[in-house]
Image (cartoon, helix red, strand yellow):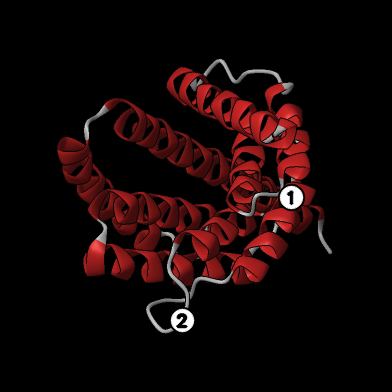
Amino acid sequence: MSSQCFFSLLVLSVFLSVASVGNSVHAEQQISGIQQEWDQTYFTLDNKPRKKALRKLIEKTEAMRKQQPQNAGLYIWEAIIRASYNEAAGGLGGLRQARAAKSLLETSIELDPNALDGLAYTELGALYYRVPGWPVSFGDNDKAKELLLKGLSFEKTDLEAFYLLGHFYIDEENWPAAIDTLEKGLRLPEQPDRPAFEQIRRNEMQLLLNEAKEQLAN
């Protein structure tokens, strides 16, 4: 190989590497922006304006996901937003969003099971215990527990993973497991870039922890 040819290949390799890094940074910024917009929508708005804002955020995230069909993180966040709309809307419309969220999370796992530190497993587990079971929908508490634990095994510093698993144990009336999970979550360092999320989730976790301790004492 001539020195000129080698130099050309080296320049091309560097260019492609820089482009790949640039695309990765851009994708991370997009997901961070969606996360912050969801925080503001979900934690600060009342139900009616929240539903409207979530609907718009679904459309925005879906458009981004269709432009980047290999970006597993966008599938996860579209699913989170659709699941949040399910909570706000309820009824058959909400269940349709829950089923769509389930499909998105399963696709995300197929694309990259490690995306966003295994968040797809955590969110899929939450769906399985929040929706009704057969014949109304796909709810399944055994499957929910399996997925929630798997999600937590990926990332042990995710407040949401501890919150969701702790909430699950509360619903199951497994008070010792709920206490252990919630206490571990509350000991995590706060995320300064998510103030609304941190404040409200930690307050909710403390209330759940108090309930579990009270029930265990009775």
Instruction: Give the residue pinned by disc 1.
Output: 10
Which mark is on residue 134?
2
Mark 2 burial class by Cα count in 10 Å: few <14, some 14-19, many 20+: few
Amino acid, disc 1: Leu
The percent coordinates of residue 180 (x first, y second) are 78, 35
Q: If you read the primary sequence from the N terminus, does the residue marked by circle 2 or circle 1 appear first?
A: 1
Q: Is residue 175 left or right of residue 191?
A: right
Q: Is residue 41 left or right of residue 210?
A: left
Residue at 56 percent of width and 15 percent of height: 192
Amino acid, disc 2: Trp
Relative vertical location of residue 206 with respect to residue 47 in this rendering, above or below? above
Q: Looking at this view, is 24 or 85 the one in front?
A: 85
Relative vertical location of residue 115 with respect to residue 161 in this rendering, above or below? below
Residue at 30 percent of width and 25 percent of height: 44
Q: What element carries label 1?
A: helix
Foreground mark, 2 or 1? 2
The percent coordinates of residue 43 (x first, y second) are 36, 29
